[in-house]
Image: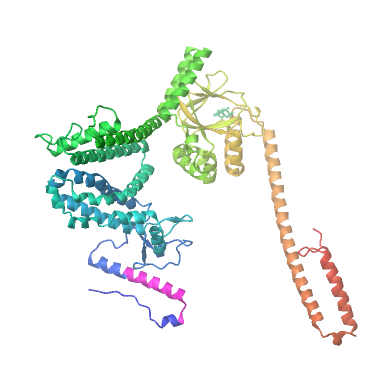
Amino acid sequence: MVTVSVKIDENLSNHYSPNVLTNVRHRLGRVAHTFRAALRLGRSRSDSRPPDWFVDKSQEKKGDSNEGIPPTCWGYRIVVDPSLPWHYKWLMVISLAVLYNVIFVVGRAVFWELNNSVPPLWYTLDYVCDVIYIFDILVRAHEGYLEQGLLVTDPQKLRRNYLSSKKWKLDVISLLPTDVVYCWWPPSDCQLQVPCSVIVRLNRVFKLPRLWDWFERTETDTNYPNVFRICKVLLAILVLIHWNACLYFAISYAIGFGTDNWVYNIDGPKNSTLTRQYIYSFYWSTLTLTTIGETPVPENDAEYLFVVADFLAGVLIFATIVGNIGSMISNMNLARVDFQNRMDGVKQYMAFRKVGRELEARVIRWFAYTWAESGALDEERVLSALPDKLKAEIAIRVHLDTLRKVRIFQDCEPGLLEALVLKLRLQVFSPGDYICRKGDVGKEMYIVKRGRLQVVADDGKTVLATLGAGSVFGEVSVLDIAGNRTGNRRTANVRSLGYSDLFCLAKDDLWVALADYPEARATLTERGCQILRKDGLLDEEIFRRSTVSQDTMEESISSLERAVETLQTRLARLIAEFSASQAKLKQRLTKIELRPKDEDEDQPSSRCSRRRLRSFETRKKSCPPTMPRHKTM
Ligand SMILES: Nc1nc2c(ncn2[C@@H]2O[C@@H]3COP(=O)(O)O[C@H]3[C@H]2O)c(=O)[nH]1
C-alpha cells in the first residue's frame, strides 16, 4: 500500500509568515490529492474527478467571499450546493423516508395485524430511514447558503448556520432513540391484539419540514405547477384521513370493539380481517371529515366529543383545501376564460353596432387564429416581472429565428438586436387585411415573422413585391430619407395574403435604437433609397446635397473633436508645469525662512526675499490653486 503524507517542517514557521505557510499547505494538499488520484487511476481506471459536491479551492473565482479559508478535506471543502440536481434527488429520498414514517408509524401502531404481517421488513425499513435521517444531518450541516449573493463554502460558517437554526433542533428531536422503550415495551407485544410500541417512533414525523423543502423545490422547477399543487393537496387530504382513521380504530379499541353501534365491531370473519378494519376506518374517517354522509350516531360522551372535534376539523381543513383546489383549477383556465371574455365583449359590441355579418366573421376568425397560434398569450404582461436584460435574452431566444432571416440584422451588433427585440410588438393580420395604405403617415416599421404579404400599387392589383418571413417593410416612410418625394407618407399599399404574424416597431423606438448604430441606419436608408429610386420617388439632387452637407457636418464635428482633444492636452501640460514651478518656489521660500535671523537681518537680499514672499502670499490668495490666472484659454 502506498501512503502519501504532506508535512511542513516546524522550523519553517520561524522563517515564513503564516499566510505563506497556509498557501504552501494548500498547494501541497492539492499535489497530494492529484498524486492520490493518479494512483487510484493507475489501480482502477475509474474517473478520479472529485464529485460535484466538492468545491475545488483552485477552481474558485477570485473575489469569492470564501477566499483564504483553509480546505478541510484533502484540498477540498465539502459543500452541498442546494441548486445542484443531486441535492434535489436527495430531497426526494429524504421525503420518501419522511412519508414512510408519517404513514406507517401510526398505521402499524394501531393496526397490529399490519405490524405483525412482515416484522423483518418493517424493522429494516425503519432503520434504513434512520440512516437516511442521519445522513441528512450531515448534508444539512454542509448545505451552502448565499451571503451577499455568493455561496458560502466555509465549513465553520456552514456548521454555525445549521446549528443556530430551528432545523437542527427538529432534526435532533426526530432522531431521538425513542426505540429504547422497546426494552420495557417489546414489539413482540404486538402479537397480542393491542396497539403496538412502534408509536414511540412518532418523533420521526418532526422531519416533515424536509418534505416541504422538496415540495417547494418541485413547485418551482416543474412546468405544471397547478397539477403538482393539486397532487400535493390530495396527498395532504389522504394523510389526514388516514391519521383520523387510525385514531378512530384506536378509540374503538379503547372503548371496546363492538360495545355499541358507533365503535368498530371486530367480530365476524369479515370484520376481523386487516383489510376490512382499515377500509371501514378509512371510510368512516372520510365521511366524518368531509361531513358528506351519514355516520353512525355516537353513543357515549367520548364518542360525541371525538365526532364533534372531527366535524370541526373537517369543516376547517376541507373548506381551506376545497377553496385552494377551486382557485388552482380556475387559475389553470384563467388564460382561456380571459380570452373568451374578451372575445364575447367584442362580439357583443359588433352585434350592438351592427358592423355586418362579413366583418363579424372575419373578427371571429382572427380570434380563433390568435388562440390557436399563441394561446392569446400576453407576452408583455407575463414577462413584466423580469429585468430588461433577462427579458431581452428570452425575447432573442424566442424571436431569434425570425431576426436571423432579416438581412439587415444578420451582421449587426448584438446590442442593437437586444435594443430592438424588446420593442417589438407582435400583431396578427387576417387574409386581405391592409397593413398600410399608400399616402398614410408612416409611424411604424414591420418585420414579417410568419405569412405572406403583397406590396400593391394604387389599383390594388399590380403587385410590386411579395414579402415572406424575415422581410422588412415600412421603413421608407419612417426613416425621413432626404429627397423622398412622398415625405413621411407610405409609398405603397401592403396587404396580407393569408394570416400573417408581424413584429411592429414604432418609429420613435427605431430612431432611438439606430442613434447608437449608424451602420445599421445606413443599411436601412440604402435599402429605402433603392426602393424610392425604383419607383422614381427620390429627388437625387436633394439627396446628394443632404449627403454632402451631412458629410461636411460630420467632418466639422470630427475636426472640433480633434481641437478639443489638443486643447485638453495643452491644458494638462500647463497645469503640470504650474504645479511644478509652484512647488519649487515654495521650497526656495521655505529655505530662506529657515535661515538664521541675525545672519540675514542686515542683508539687502533677504529684505528683497521677504518682499517677494509677501507678494507671493498675496498672489496665492487671489489666485485659484490649480489654474494659472495669467494663462488665457
Ligand atoms: N414603394 C415601394 N415599396 C415597397 C416595395 N417593396 C417593398 N416595399 C415596402 O412597402 C412599404 C410601404 O410603406 P413605406 O413606404 O413606409 O415602405 C415601403 C417598403 O418598405 C416596392 O417595390 N415599392
Q: How many marks?
A: 0
- Judge whether 182 appears above or below 281 on screen: below
- Judge whether 589 appears above or below 447 on screen: below
Q: Residue furthest front?
A: 301
- Judge whether 597 appears above or below 277 on screen: below
The image shows residue 116 at horizontal and vertical percentages of 13, 47
Q: Is residue 603 left or right of residue 338?
A: right
The image shows residue 22 at horizontal and vertical percentages of 42, 73
Magenta range: 15-34
Q: Quadrant of residue 374?
A: top left
The answer to if 451 sits in the magenta stretch is no
**Residue at 86% of width from left, 74% of height from top?**
612
Q: Is residue 114 left or right of residue 571?
A: left
State whether residue 497 appears in this view.
no
Quarter holding ligand 1? top right
The image shows residue 525 at horizontal and vertical percentages of 60, 37
**Residue at 88% of width from left, 81% of height from top?**
605
The image shows residue 561 at horizontal and vertical percentages of 70, 52
The one nearer the camera, 22 or 154, is 154
The answer to if 25 sits in the magenta stretch is yes
Q: Quadrant of residue 584?
A: bottom right
The one nearer the camera, 535 or 310, is 310
Tell me the quarter of the image containing the N terminus. Answer: bottom left
